[in-house]
Image (tube, coloured by chain):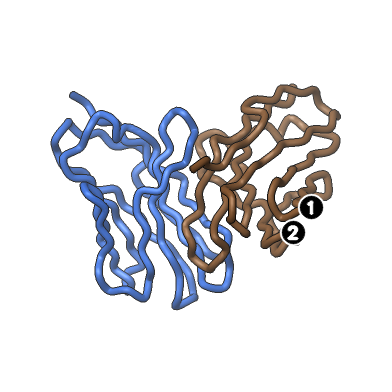
């Protein structure tokens, strides 16, 4: 079956602009996660959805970052007033929803803020 | 705070040989799950192996096996009969039974040479 997909694969924007990153999880997976991976580092947790609601958004760095999952499937990560420090690979993952279930990752979106 | 430490930033192994990647973690929880993920240059994070902390038996998946030492909070990955396609970044990660986000280490870059 289809895996997790993310669009776009690459996004270049200018400082101060608004961007949206999209994630399509595996069909039937109720849990969806966003992570950010800076160069040379492991992924860092941003936010976790169980169904339509954000169950844990403790990893969002500040109020410029926001994510939605209105129908419990596709999710969009939104970044306002982008800064150069936001440049990273943004990874999305999904799982069946139980504690410790394997998370399946998408290929990521590389965001570059000029 | 929960942390994951991978003390080997880079490792190299010859094809067909065996290599062990180290990982230690710190948590005050008793129930948790441990993972090794592989990330080739394509960026796609792929699950290698998963271990449930309450299980004494070490997990194995074909050429991949773990040495899980719960008291020492150690979770090393052994790759037997290394293949050129094993060249990648390897990340150790864990999540607790009460939280769903993965905590990742900084990764080990493995190079398999002919």
Which residue is found at the position 66% from the left and 57% from the top?
Answer: A48
A106 lies above or below A58: above
Say which chain tag 2 marks.
A
Task: Tell me the number on the disc at residue A70.
Answer: 1
B98 lies above or below A97: below
Colour-to-chain, blue: B
Task: Tell me the number on the disc at residue B77.
Answer: none
Say which chain tag 1 marks.
A
Q: Nearer the viewer, residue B8 or A62?
A: A62
Which residue is found at the position 32% from the left and 36% from the top?
Answer: B110
Real-space Cα distance between discs 2 and 1?
6 Å
* Residue B101 position within the rendered picture, expressed as x and y whole percent measured from the top left: 58, 59
Disc 2, disc 1: CB below 8 Å?
Answer: yes
Instruction: Name the side, left or right, on which B11 lies relative to A112.
Output: left
SS under mark 2: loop
Colour-to-chain, brown: A
B40 lies above or below A46: above
Residue B28 visible in the snapshot: yes
* Residue B21 position within the rendered picture, expressed as x and y whole percent measured from the top left: 29, 48
């Amino acid at each position: 079956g289809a895996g997790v997909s993310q669009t776009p694969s690459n996004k270049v924007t200018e400082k101060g602009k608004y961007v949206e990153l999209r994630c399509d999880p595996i069909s039937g997976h109720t849990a969806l996660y966003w992570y950010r991976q800076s160069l040379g580092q492991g992924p860092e947790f941003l936010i976790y959805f169980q169904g339509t609601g954000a169950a844990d958004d403790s990893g969002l760095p500040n109020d410029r970052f926001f994510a939605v999952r209105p129908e419990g499937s596709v999710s969009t990560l939104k970044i306002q007033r982008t800064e150069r420090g936001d440049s990273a690979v943004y990874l999305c993952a999904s799982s069946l929803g139980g504690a410790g279930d394997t998370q399946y990752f998408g290929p990521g979106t590389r965001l570059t803020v000029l | 705070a929960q942390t994951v430490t991978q003390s080997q930033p880079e490792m190299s192994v010859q094809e067909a040989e065996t290599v062990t990647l180290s990982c230690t973690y710190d948590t005050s929880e008793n129930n948790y799950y441990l993972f090794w993920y592989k990330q080739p240059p394509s960026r796609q994070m792929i699950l290698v192996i998963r271990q449930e902390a309450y299980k004494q038996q070490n997990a194995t998946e074909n050429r991949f096996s773990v040495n899980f030492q719960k008291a020492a909070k150690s979770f090393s990955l052994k790759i037997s009969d290394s293949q050129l396609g094993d060249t990648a970044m390897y990340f150790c990660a864990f999540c607790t039974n009460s939280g769903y986000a993965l905590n990742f280490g900084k990764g080990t870059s493995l190079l398999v040479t002919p």
